[in-house]
């Protein structure tokens, strides 16, 4: 696989959204470049337009561009508002088209709104961690859901083995 520039990465953001001890999963459109037709969680890519036309937080930079971009992606994909966004983990992978991707995964609670899907996804479900095991999730998503499930229960979330999920 040819990687054109080893210093450049696409930045993607995901959110494990929880409501009433259940987690929102969505089924990707079969036309997507990465993971077509698989179940995942809402998210998308950071775009320069997410911040470039807004006032800088300091004279040199935009703070909170990542979380604001994630809020935009959630609103676009599933039409809901979420509460406080908390960092969960990061990961990297290389897309089938050779583009390296850095994924920043977060978790947050549902705040308001009814699910309305855009063209990126074709179905959605609110599932418990145990229910999620029955879906063809993108590798690692089940582990992320398990981590959040443990965090919300006050349990140790550092003992997830992503190789077994």
Image (cartoon, helix red, strand yellow):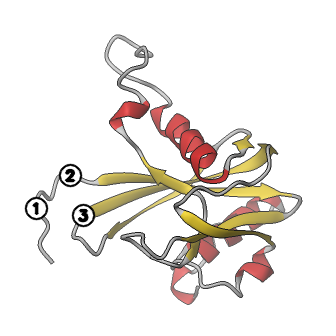
Picture quarter with the C terminus: bottom right
Q: Which residue is drawn at the image coordinates 24% and 71% (left, top)?
A: 97
- The residue labelled by disc 1 is 4
Q: Which residue is drawn at the image coordinates 72% and 79% (left, top)?
A: 132
Percent across and percent down for residue 102 are: 36, 57
N-terminal label among 2 and 3: 2
Q: Which residue is drawn at the image coordinates 70% and 38% (left, top)?
A: 84
The extreme front residue here reads 119
Q: Is 154 displayed left or right of 46 in the figure?
A: right
The extreme right residue here reads 20
Q: Which residue is drawn at the image coordinates 39% and 71% (left, top)?
A: 34
Examine the rendered structure and indicate whether residue 4 appears above or below residue 136: above
What kind of element bears circle 1? loop
Q: Residues within 10 Å of mark 3 (few under 14, many from 20)?
A: some
The numbered mark at residue 99 is: 3
CA gap between label 2 and label 1 equals 9 Å
Q: Residues within 10 Å of mark 1 (few under 14, many from 20)?
A: few
- The residue labelled by disc 2 is 8
CA gap between label 1 and label 3 equals 8 Å
Picture quarter with the N terminus: bottom left
Examine the rendered structure and indicate whether residue 84 appears above or below residue 96: above
N-terminal label among 1 and 3: 1
What kind of element bears circle 3? loop
Q: Are marks 2 and 1 in contact (CB under 8 Å)?
A: yes
Examine the rendered structure and indicate whether residue 138 appears above or below residue 154: below
């Amino acid at each position: 696989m040819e990687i054109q520039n080893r210093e450049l990465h696409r930045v993607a953001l995901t959110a494990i959204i929880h409501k009433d001890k259940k987690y929102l999963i969505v089924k990707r459109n079969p036309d997507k470049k990465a993971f077509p037709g698989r179940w995942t969680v809402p998210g998308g890519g950071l775009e320069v337009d997410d911040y470039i036309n807004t006032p800088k937080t300091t004279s040199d930079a935009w703070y909170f561009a990542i979380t604001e971009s994630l809020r935009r992606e959630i609103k676009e994909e599933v039409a809901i508002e979420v509460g406080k966004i908390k960092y969960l983990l990061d990961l990297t992978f290389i897309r089938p088209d050779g583009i390296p991707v850095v994924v920043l995964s977060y978790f947050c609670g549902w705040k308001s709104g009814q699910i309305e899907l855009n063209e990126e996804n074709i179905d959605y479900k609110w599932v418990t961690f145990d229910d999620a095991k029955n879906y063809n999730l993108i590798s690692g998503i089940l582990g992320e859901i398990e981590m959040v499930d443990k965090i919300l229960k006050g349990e140790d979330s550092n003992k997830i083995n992503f190789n077994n999920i």
